[in-house]
Image (spheres, grey):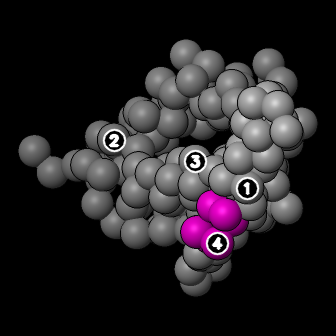
Amino acid sequence: MSGRTRGWLFGLAAILAIQVLRMPVRNGSAQDGFEAPPEVRSAVLTACFQCHSERARWPWYTQIAPFSWFVHAQVEEARKRLNFSSWKDYLYDPGTAAQKFGAINQMVRSDAMPPWYFRALSARGRLTAAQRAAIETWAIEGRARALKAEPN
């Protein structure tokens, strides 16, 4: 057996061996307290809920290591930063609401969200210019309302 063949076999064996190190598929309570105008809600449900909610879909490729490790880490981090399943909780505190609306606006306006790799993997991750504009307007208005409501 040539060195090249041994290398391929070793690589294949390593990929198969790491499959035992599965990441747990975790979706928490799927409360849906997210309210927004219909065009914003539709865009957010389609492009953002995959990572930023407890209602993530886990396609087959999210179960193949080492790719699954990356996807699971990204979803966990996304949920920590913004979780639309907890949206109503954010709105109870005007300061938190203002921060979340501001971050949404900044990330969508700068094209940082959805991330490029999600857009590459899924057509669901691609926002149209109209969807981006609707989300930005909603976020700007929401931030302004939250700042007005914040005690001095």
Instruction: Determine the CA span between mark 1 and mark 3.
Output: 20 Å
Residue 87 can be seen in this image: yes
Picture coordinates of residue 32, whole percent (x, y): 64, 73
Instruction: Determine the CA span between mark 4 and mark 3.
Output: 16 Å
- For marks 4 and 3, the one nearer the N-term is 4
Residue drawn 58% across the image and 47% down it: 70
- The residue to which callout 3 is attached is 70
Residue 113: in magenta span: no
- The residue to which callout 4 is attached is 20
Q: Nearer the viewer, mark 2 or mark 4?
A: 4
Label 1 sits on what residue type?
Ala
Residue drawn 51% across the image and 36% down it: 104
Label 4 sits on what residue type?
Val
Instruction: Determine the CA span between mark 2 and mark 4.
Output: 40 Å
* Relative depth, front residue between 104 and 69: 69
Quarter of the picture containing the N terminus is top right
Q: Nearer the viewer, mark 4 or mark 3?
A: 4
- Residues in magenta, as a range: 17-22
- The residue to which callout 2 is attached is 99
Q: Nearer the viewer, mark 1 or mark 3?
A: 1
- For marks 1 and 3, the one nearer the N-term is 1
* Badge 2: residue crowd in 10 Å (few <14, some 14–19, many ≥20): some
Residue drawn 82% across the image and 31% down it: 2
